[in-house]
Image (cartoon, rainbow, N blue to C red):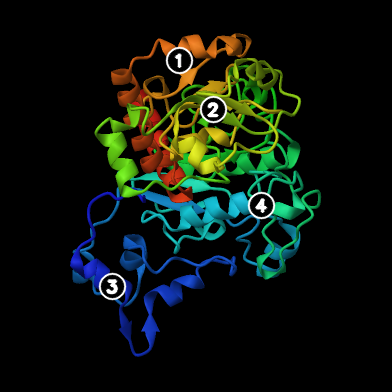
Amino acid sequence: MNEHHGAASPSQSHLRHHQGGGYHLLQEAQYMLNDRTMRLSPFVDRPWLHFNSNILSESAKKDIHLPKRKLILTDFGWNHPNATKGLSEFPRSLRSRELLQAFIDHPDFDPTVSWTREMAAGNATVDPALQYVVLMDIETCFESNYPNPVEQYQANADTQGGRLVNFKVQNPCSGIGLGGCHDLVGSILVSSLFQKHPNGSSLMYFECSGNGFARGYRKINPSLDLFIFSLSSAPHRQLLTASDMGLPPPPPHPVWLSFQQRQAIRNCESESPQHRPYLFTFMGKLGRSQVRQKLKAIHNGKDVLVTYSGGIANETYSSVLYKSIFSGAPRGDNLFSYRFTEVLSAGAIPVVYADQWVLPFHQKLVDWGKCAVVIPEKNARQTVDILGQIDPAQRCRMRQYCYDIYLKYMVNPEAHIAGMLKSIEVARKDRL
């Protein structure tokens, strides 16, 4: 799912495994990351690594197809030059780890760049033809309920290498807009990179708090170079529509479709009752959500199934999703729902009940109006009537679009990163 800018040449593939006198390029690159608990995948072509290596002649470097973008990781926290400090003072969630792994395994990532030594110290060599995207190596994606639904940070903490798991200790970004984190963000935005290339440098920020980032934060930091991808935000959080977008919820229980099941989506066979006998389903926790209370009223035990305890006889969660034409993604205590992505993974059409929830990615990259059915929370009891007005031909188009978006931008963390990078690209072009 990585987003490539031009296919790698045969010489690049060879370079990835180049060895001479015991020298291995990728092995050397491991030491370019201060965070030794992270490993660069050997299955990714890395043109920036090849280009900046010392083992290639200048003539050989001319054959490397360089990307039009460079991804850079800072070194404030996890990637701190003092590796012991990075482990003992900076906790990390499992969600942040998987997003970080996807970021450093993107072909555009340059592991040779030292943020403090080059970009922050005024020594940045900036190519005006490139787009630069920076990721901060600090925990910003606090998700206490993923992948283990226990609502405890410790149970969902990255403990590799003996990393600190106390999220209340030495953690400046427990909420963007709070002192320490605001200062770190500000230091990046005034760095030599952003000063020298103001129209081509972007800071990508993951925000995973249940209620969105701090109310009014954009009043004190209106920078359009800061792209906040928020898991559970709404417009009243002062989103700048030119820079702020939704973050895709990770699916704790994705459904894996067979080739035949995927083909049924492609040729519209999924619209037949034999493939998808349930008009609408929702299986989940009731919690304190009022909209989930309302959905109880539409359950008929036949083609509309809504259950909050146990399961459905002779069915699994995955089988119910696959057999559903539409499936609910109602808000819980927060606006977002993991079920949104799980529904997409099953080839079902998501029905969203979360007033003003900002859906993932840039609106010009993904038009959710072609896929999801968004029903105001107050109208949840009208769900069956609303869905009944969508004919099979339209359902097929919606399902195909949904599943294409899932495979391209939602299927795994690598796809999430690709979608966010593409969203930044679209947003910048949209400003021109």
Mark 4 residue type: Ser
Q: Residue 47 carries which label?
A: none
Q: Earlier in the sequence, mark 1 or mark 3?
A: 3
Q: Is residue 112 left or right of residue 394?
A: right
Which of the two marks, 1 or 3, is nearer to us in this view?
1
Q: Which of marks 3 and 4 is nearer the N terminus?
A: 3
Determine whether the residue tagged by mark 3 lies in a helix, strand or loop: helix
Q: Residue at x 69, y 41 (%)?
A: 181
What residue would you read off at disc 2? 281
What residue would you read off at disc 3? 15
Vertical placement of residue 225 versus 382, above or below:
below
What residue would you read off at disc 1? 387
What residue would you read off at disc 4? 93
Q: Is residue 402 left or right of residue 134?
A: left
Mark 1 residue type: Leu
Give the Cα separation between the discs numbered 1 and 3.
54 Å
Q: Which of marks 4 and 1 is nearer the N terminus?
A: 4
Give the Cα separation between the discs numbered 4 and 2.
31 Å
Give the Cα separation between the discs numbered 4 and 1.
38 Å
Give the Cα separation between the discs numbered 3 and 4.
34 Å
Q: Which residue is drawn at 30% across and 45% down?
A: 260
